[in-house]
Amino acid sequence: MVHRGNPAAMRAAKLMEQLNATGKRQLISKLLLVAAIPRLLFVLATPWLSRRPFGGEGYDGYLQVATNIVTEGTFAVAPHHLLSRPPLYPLLLAPGVAFGIPILWTYTLQVVLGVATVLFVFLAICEVCQSRALAFGCAAWFAIDPWLIWCTKNPMPPVTSTFVMSAIVLVYVKGIRSHSLAIYRFIGLGALAAIAALIHPALLPMVAGIVAGQFLAIHGKHLFMVTSLRAVAIVAGFVLVLSPWLARNYALTGRPVASVDTAGFTYFASQVAYNGTLKPNPFEFSEVASHLNVSVADLDVQYFTIKDEYNARLNKLAAADIVTGHWSFLNLAKRCTIQIIWLWLGAEGLMLSAAHLVYLLPIFALLTRAIARGFFLDVLVMLIVIVPTTCVHLVSMNIIPHATYSMPLLVPILVAAAICSKGALSAGILRDNRESSSDGRNTAVLAK
């Protein structure tokens, strides 16, 4: 303990603080290089690696939406496809289209966001782990994720959604470890969750996981009111940011569509394709058309989506099929198991799938170790964030290679895995809350 009346001790403490800050800055500088160099090299090599035209059919039409924003002022893949893609990622691409440099703009944007993501992951791990060496190692490992680097060249939202997820996890961890109400922080957390949903639709239910995590982390009945206020602030921030898009969609369809309107479509597009094997299958537009009693031509397929007018009917049919349909527990369990494999390992080729498997093994080994060391609740507080989104993937996604969708989910998993370290024994996510709950320090929270 440093006393105010001891100048020597105060000078020593200040010097130690300066040394710590300098050491942290040096680690960050090295980390940014580790993140930036492979991305820049990969982007430079893209002309020799890419097998698809930039922004073509295989990239889901995000560049087409950006082009329509610039040229026609509409958020649309095509005139009858107004609700098939979320708005924020095309908005980020739109300046590149407007300036006539869409490829350069996209590559620059995604390299910058990829590097910033690694920085946020490092800072989040520093919050739950006293070992900077472990924090640096985990963040550097995240920086060389082969899928994250591969997607730098694609005009699609995985890199951007992973960046937003890293910001969410950083704010989330800081909020849980805080002893004050800090209502602004939780409004911002809800706003970030809405931004994530407006970039990647499957992240829409993540706000439920964020709220649930707040209640999992509390210790002591006197903290329940504070946590409830935090939950209200999260939902308020979420609704506030999402409301303009809700209002726009209600004006178009009479329904307040929260992100995109294609859940029923993707559900039925995968039903026939799903055959209980590990073989990936494409969309089955004939299956979708048969449920609507129309022809495939009537669907007006554009970038793997169909006319907006059919989506409401498909959503109702899908809900009825899930509730009263043919899903047995065994069939659903088998489907979800295969979906988990494709969610994490699905790739454009066997080599990339194998590389990602090798990459993931140390992360899940650390996660297992964290649980074995008695940090199950700490790990659960992190993983609960992504449970709702994972469930959406397992039920509605079609069986095609889509490991890109798991990239945002990897951020909280990696932070949870970092809790396994010795340093985290005194600095787990919940550790401060447990200690302060036992000595009564948090009773002053409401007064703040």
Image (cartoon, grey):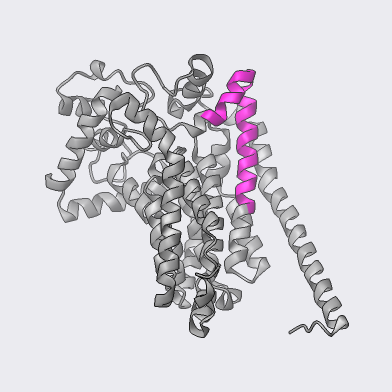
Give the mark count.
Answer: 0
> Residue reaching furthest front?
447
Residue, x 54% and y 38% (percent of image)? 151
Dividing the picture into quadrants, the one containing residue 298 is top left
Instruction: Identify the image quadrant of the C terminus.
Output: bottom right
As for residue 320 lying within the magenta part, the answer is no
Task: Find the magenta span and give its range.
Answer: 91-119
Dividing the picture into quadrants, the one containing residue 28 is bottom right
Residue 163 picture location, percent across and down: 56, 46
As for residue 95 lying within the magenta part, the answer is yes
Q: Is residue 364 above or below residue 396?
A: below
Residue, x 32% and y 35% (percent of image)? 256
Comparing 293 with 201, the one in front is: 201
Residue, x 40% and y 63% (percent of image)? 228
Residue 100 picture location, percent across and down: 63, 17
Comparing 278 with 252, the one in front is: 252
Most frequent secondary structure within the magenta stretch: helix
Q: Is residue 414 above or below residue 442?
A: above
Residue 9 picture location, percent across and down: 83, 82
The answer to whether one can see residue 322 in this image is yes
Comparing 22 with 344, the one in front is: 22
The answer to whether one can see residue 358 in this image is no
Horizontal relation, residue 448 to residue 6: left or right = left
Residue 232 picture location, percent across and down: 41, 56
Q: Is residue 276 above or below residue 243?
A: below
Instruction: Identify the image quadrant of the N terminus.
Output: bottom right
